[in-house]
Amino acid sequence: MDRRKFTRNVLWGSLSLYFAKVPFVSADIIIHYPFKTLPETFGAIQFDPVKKGNSFFVVTADVHYGSKGTDGMLSTISEVNNMDPHPAFLCVNGDMICNASPSFGIIPTHEGRQKAIEEYRAFKKDIDLLNPTVRLILALGNHDTHSKEIDPEIFWEVFPGYPPYQSFNLSGMHIIVLNGHNTGYIDAKQMEWLSNNVHLIHKDQKIIVLIHQPSMSHRVRERGIPAAVSEVFKDHRGQIWLIGGHEHLNGQKVFQLPKTKLVEHSITCGTANMWGGLERPGYWIYCLSNGEVAARIFKHRTQGFRLEPKPDLNSAVNVPMPFDHLKNVVWKIMVGKDDRKFLINSKANDCLDYWTYVKELTYRVPIKETGNRCKRIAMLCEYSNMPSLNLEGQYFLSSDMKEWDEIWMEDTKFETLIFAIPDHFQQAENLYFKFRPSGEAHVGGYALTL
């Protein structure tokens, strides 16, 4: 993927806001941090944190205790402790540690579990230095849990009884903290709690959701989050902010829900020596005023403060859904929804509703059940290395699992790979589709179309 070059200039005073952003083609980045202190930044936007109806909170993510070279939370904790007034809360929005699951779908060994507990203890030793007047909010990320956990048992070894999801009100806004688990989904128990929670608030209430994975644009991996959010908030009218980490970079996108808009704000990692966006490390300060997000401030660890402009709500896009662009879908299965009766073979990590790090994956596709009318087979697939899509030796079709024909991709669009079914397979009872990717791939489902 081509890289871009941009120049960003921010100056937000009491009477004006200036922000320039130019597409970039190299790593030559200029980001201005015009403010040296938080009071100076508050003054530039005339935000009084102690005024009735006003408050602010700090959110960071991906501090990754246990990862070599990272410097943890001490710097952020010290800065938060020195804030006057103190923020209403500090949220660590996932990936506090590394080894409750070192990778998607990995269940830790006994040794790995013990290592994760030690990482949590190291994190707790530092976070206990937080001023006790600042509320601590912890959201669980993919490295904090593993794919077989519903309740966060490893986390509870060090933080016994800490709620994996919760909600509270602040300055007229409703704040919801969710557990995105290891694989980016909302479990059934949590979904029931979330539905009841949203049902009890006014439909015009503005909401902030804190969840580790900002996955509203995902059709394949972590698609359980956009599905849950879309369902729970389908009748809600108040604007929603979703704050996530996970991607280790600052960015945002606006999504259109049926009756409101959702601003998804991803934030960079809070520790040094991690991969990710060029603004790392840092944290965000959300300024609230009488039910509104009044301002957002980014604090770079060493360079100072800058202001983020208000999102362009006119840029909202629909939440993507699996196979949403395909026409004439006759049959489909989604991983995690009764797909295992069609699964023949998997050499991949099981992420419950998708497969990841696929080495080989074979599914039975019952073409006869469609009246042998279908001409194409589609695979929902997020492929990290796009040039690898057309390499040979990846896609195979059989009617008996004895003789395999290599087939070639006809088209790809919106994380969907499409293949024409050769004529000599059209009257088979079943098709067997084998996938051996040349790059890193996540697979979420299959479909047959006319």
Image (cartoon, rainbow, N blue to C red):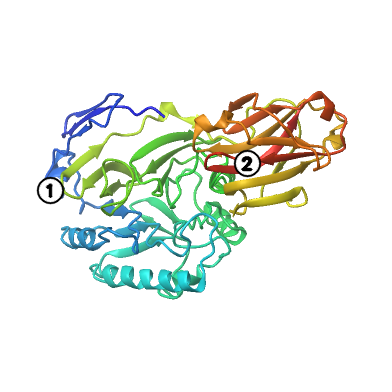
**How many residues crowd mark 1 within 10 Å: few (<14), some (14–19), many (20+)?**
few
| Residue 309: x %, y % from top left | 28, 34
Frontmost residue, 95 versus 200: 95
Which quarter of the image is occupied by the C terminus? top right
Q: Residue at x 86, y 37 (%)?
A: 369
Which structural element holds mark 1?
A: loop
Q: Residue at x 40, y 75 (%)?
A: 158
- Height in image: 100 above or below 157? above
Give the quadrant of residue 124.
bottom left
| Residue 404: x %, y % from top left | 76, 37
Frontmost residue, 15 versus 245: 245
| Residue 72: x %, y % from top left | 27, 61
| Residue 308: x %, y % from top left | 27, 37
Frontmost residue, 125 versus 98: 98
Which quarter of the image is occupied by the N terminus? top left
Identify the residue position indicated by label 1 in the image: 37
Residue type, mark 1 in image = Thr
Identify the residue position indicated by label 2 in the image: 436
Q: Horizontal placement of 81 versus 423: left or right?
A: left
Give the quadrant of residue 22.
top left
Frontmost residue, 60 versus 205: 60
**How many residues crowd mark 2 within 10 Å: few (<14), some (14–19), many (20+)?**
some
Which structural element holds mark 2?
A: loop
Q: Horizontal placement of 209 versus 46: left or right?
A: right
Tell which circle, 2 or 1, labels the residue nearer the N-terminal end: 1
Residue type, mark 2 in image = Arg
- Height in image: 396 above or below 208? above
Cα gap from disc 2 to disc 1, whole angstroms: 53 Å
Count numbered badges in the picture: 2
Q: Residue at x 22, y 47 (%)?
A: 299
Q: Residue at x 34, y 46 (%)?
A: 267
